[in-house]
Image: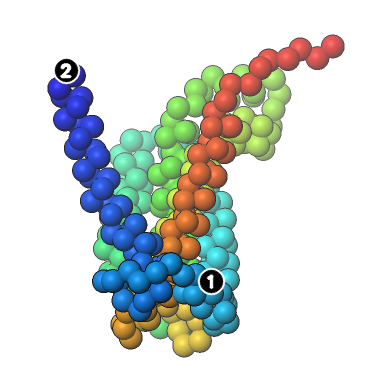
């Protein structure tokens, strides 16, 4: 048993090294005073200064954050409503059909989804830009929220709802006082997943962006095509660190929500 555990631990270490080595390599050379990723000539923060002095890039960062926050918030609301609707379906065949349709959007290639949105927006007459990017991000984030919320709904015992109704609670009170507090961890998980997916998305966004509007992923791709610049390394490092902060924030929020609360008796 011990030998198997050691092998599994070694395997995990190797996997993490393979996954994170390119990222740390990129981060390391973001501090290179030279202009290449081959010879480290000395430590410098000039590439980070260049990023923060680029007005156009700052605007793109703001656009990306606004899109991510709006799409995550709206898709969380829609995803929670969708998860509740699916959980209330009685027929197993209908429920499985809805779950399949939801999962298809998750596993479908981003290129197909992006091309489909491009065709749809062109037919409907929606101008490519902020609105098209926001709508597309909401669309591919909603199924993710549904997947994160449904397990919490399935964990909840029906006796909680029955007890609330026996005590005279209305449908709205059951929803706001019983169901939503119980599935709060799933809601937070769905929100943060939608937020990170929106921040990281490139394929779908590439199809639906228009002239004068861009997001970080598309901007990094455009700059990388023009040639290697260590400012891209600096920008990628900042995005990676921001993502880590989001993950840590979600972890602490989840830990606080899962912490058992003491039962106090009011006199």
The x and y percentages for residue 257 are 58, 32
User: Would you call the spot at circle 2 few (<14 residues within 10 Å), some (14-19), or many (20 or more)?
Assistant: few
Q: Are marks 1 and 2 in contact (CB under 8 Å)?
A: no
The x and y percentages for residue 19 are 27, 52
The x and y percentages for residue 224 are 33, 79
Instruction: Judge by depth and name the residue closer to the eye, 61 or 67.
Output: 61
Residue bearing mark 1: 61
Instruction: Judge by depth and name the residue closer to the eye, 195 or 179.
Output: 195
Residue bearing mark 2: 1
- View extreme (bottom): residue: 211
User: Would you call the spot at circle 1 few (<14 residues within 10 Å), some (14-19), or many (20 or more)?
Assistant: some
Q: Residue at x 62, y 30 (%)?
A: 178
Q: Which residue is drawn at 51% across and 86% down?
A: 212
Q: Which residue is drawn at 33% across and 86% down?
A: 226
Asked if residue 69 lies left or right of residue 128, the reply is right
Asked if residue 257 lies left or right of residue 93, the reply is right
Vertically, is 85 above or below 232? above
């Amino acid at each position: 048993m011990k030998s198997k555990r050691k092998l599994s631990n070694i395997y995990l270490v190797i996997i993490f090294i393979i996954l994170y080595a390119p990222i740390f390599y990129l981060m390391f050379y973001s501090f290179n005073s030279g202009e290449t990723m081959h010879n480290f000539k000395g430590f410098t923060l000039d590439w980070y200064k260049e990023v923060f002095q680029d007005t156009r890039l700052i605007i793109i960062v703001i656009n990306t954050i606004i899109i991510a926050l709006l799409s995550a918030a709206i898709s969380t609301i829609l995803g929670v409503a969708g998860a509740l609707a699916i959980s209330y379906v009685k027929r197993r065949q209908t429920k499985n059909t809805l779950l399949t349709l939801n999962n298809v959007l998750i596993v479908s290639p981003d290129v197909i989804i992006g091309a489909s949105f491009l065709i749809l927006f062109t037919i409907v007459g929606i101008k490519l830009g902020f609105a098209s990017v926001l709508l597309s991000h909401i669309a591919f984030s909603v199924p993710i929220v549904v997947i994160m919320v449904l397990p919490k709904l399935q964990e909840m015992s029906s006796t909680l709802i029955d007890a609330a109704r026996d005590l005279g609670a209305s449908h709205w009170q059951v929803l706001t006082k019983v169901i939503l507090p119980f599935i709060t961890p799933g809601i937070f998980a769905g929100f943060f997943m939608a937020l990170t997916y929106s921040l990281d998305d490139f394929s779908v966004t590439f199809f639906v962006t228009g002239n004068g509007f861009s997001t970080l992923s598309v901007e990094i791709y455009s700059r990388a095509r023009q040639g290697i610049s260590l400012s891209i390394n600096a920008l990628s490092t900042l995005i990676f660190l921001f993502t880590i902060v989001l993950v840590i924030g979600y972890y602490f929020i989840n830990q606080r929500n899962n912490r058992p609360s003491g039962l106090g008796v009011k006199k």
